[in-house]
Amino acid sequence: MNEELRRYLIQHYSHLLSKEENQALSQVCLTKEQKEKWSKPRNKEGLINLKIQDFYGFDNPKVDELVALGQEKLIAQLTNQLLAKHSDKVFLNYCPKCNELARTPKAKQCRFCNHSWR
Ligand SMILES: [Zn+2]
């Protein structure tokens, strides 16, 4: 699977992944400094930042396990899984003329050859 296809799958079909998988995907995009700052259970006002906690899933062993794979492996694993488990819901929108992958599942025009299939 090429990078283009992986990006397309994550961008348009991450809602088919579990909450923990999405949290891990968000976490692997953080810098070290962001992670250190946001993963603390309490901010300086002494309040637990539940929204951030919920978005990134810090301190969840299931999420930690996925994050430990690293960005590249995690994305490879999740995109393979999307194609294997959800092939009925995933639409790979290839141009009928040049067979390149369109930008979105609903696109009706090719960004490579400009062919339109409206
Ligand atoms: Zn095309």
Image (spheres, grey):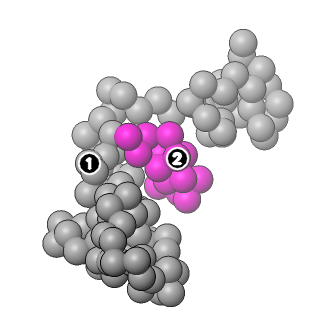
Q: Residue at x 30, y 35 (%)?
A: 86
Q: Regarding mark 2 in the picture, which secondary structure is present there?
A: helix
Looking at the rendered structure, the kind of residue marked 1 is Ser
Q: Residue at x 50, y 40 (%)?
A: 12
The vertical placement of 52 against 115, above or below, is below
Residue most extreme to the front? 45
Determine if the magenta segment contains residue 90. Answer: no
Q: Considering depth in this image, is 78 or 40 the residue closer to the camera? A: 40
* Residue 99 shows up from this direction: no
Q: Position of residue 6 (x, y in %)?
A: 49, 53
Q: Position of residue 100 (x, y in %)?
A: 66, 39
Q: Which quadrant of the figure has residue 99?
A: top right
Q: Considering depth in this image, is 99 or 58 the residue closer to the camera? A: 58
Q: Residue at x 79, y 25 (%)?
A: 115
- Mark 2 and ligand 1: say if the CB distance to the nearest ligand atom is below 8 Å: no
Q: Which residue is mark 1?
A: 18
Q: Which quadrant of the figure has residue 106?
A: top right
Label 1 close to label 2 by CB (< 8 Å): no
Q: Regarding mark 1 in the picture, which secondary structure is present there?
A: loop
The vertical placement of 81 against 86, above or below, is below
Q: Which residue is mark 2?
A: 11
Q: Considering depth in this image, is 54 or 11 the residue closer to the camera? A: 54
Q: Position of residue 67 (x, y in %)?
A: 32, 73
Which range is magenta?
A: 1-15
Q: Position of residue 64 (x, y in %)?
A: 24, 74
* Residue 53 shows up from this direction: yes
Viewed as shown, does residue 70 lie left or right of 57? right
Crowding at mark 1 (Cα within 10 Å: few <14, some 14-19, many 20+):
few
